[in-house]
Image: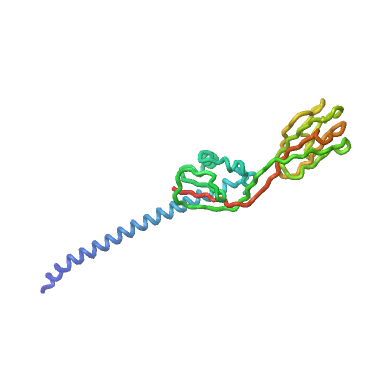
Amino acid sequence: MTRRSRAQMNLPALGVALLVVTTVAVVSVGMADRAYLSAERDADQRRVAVALSERLVGPESRVTARANVLDAGAASRLTASRLRTLFPVAEGKEVRVRLGDRTLAVAGDPAGGTTIRRLVLVENRTAASLTPNLSANAPTVTLPRRSPRVVVALSPPAGTDVTVVRANGRVVLRNASGLRGTFAVDLSRFETATLAFETDGPLPTGSLELTYYPAETRKAVLAVTVDG
């Protein structure tokens, strides 16, 4: 067999080898592209999930009482539309927000995606009342717990006028002809409030009722899932 004959016989084998190499190269490039796109998508999902979780628990968030403390009432009112309105970083993404074993809001239909979990406090406020018996000589009362507000219900007995109410020295109510009725007063949520009443007579039990809103907190896990 001549060299030319052997070369001609090897041409089909060479062609097959080149086809195999080309096919493997195309498949490898395709797999690399898909892996790159998947990694890029995962990184974007993680970026959005981290940013959204930080904004949810931030001090300026509409669903927190303070940094990393969720307001239970505000969090329970979170919806898909409010989520996208309050936190634009979630726009265009499939998002789920869970608190413990409860889903707070779902925007879209996240099937997988990236989940970021944060340990947070959840604050719940319930009403509590005081009906103190105040003498004219010591007309002050300190709330047992910190509260962001207090409702003052005044019905002084005949012959007693309350003209000024102070909270930690700050005038919050004033009426020179006498205060009577129910008044809502904002307080600092960072300090315990002492209320002082300027009165020309006693305020016996039943003539003053104070309703305040102490906080109870618990730990929970906030989970933010971002897909798409």
Q: Residue at x 53, y 46 (%)?
A: 103
Left or right for 190, reference 138: left
Q: Where is the N terminus found, in terms of image quarters? A: bottom left
From the top left corner, tell me how far across and down residue 79 is, in percent. 53, 40
In the rendered image, the residue lying farthest to the front is: 206
Q: Please tell me whether residue 68 is drawn above or below residue 182 in the rendered image.
A: below
- Pick the residue in front: 76 or 31: 76
- Pick the residue in front: 199 or 28: 199
Left or right for 32, reference 20: right
Q: Is residue 52 visible?
A: no
From the top left corner, tell me how far across and down residue 104 is, in percent. 54, 45
Instruction: State which quadrant residue 13 falls in.
Output: bottom left
Q: Residue at x 57, y 51 (%)?
A: 100
Instruction: State which quadrant residue 144 falls in.
Output: top right
- Pick the residue in front: 109 or 118: 109
Q: Is residue 26 visible?
A: yes
From the top left corner, tell me how far across and down residue 7 is, in percent. 15, 69
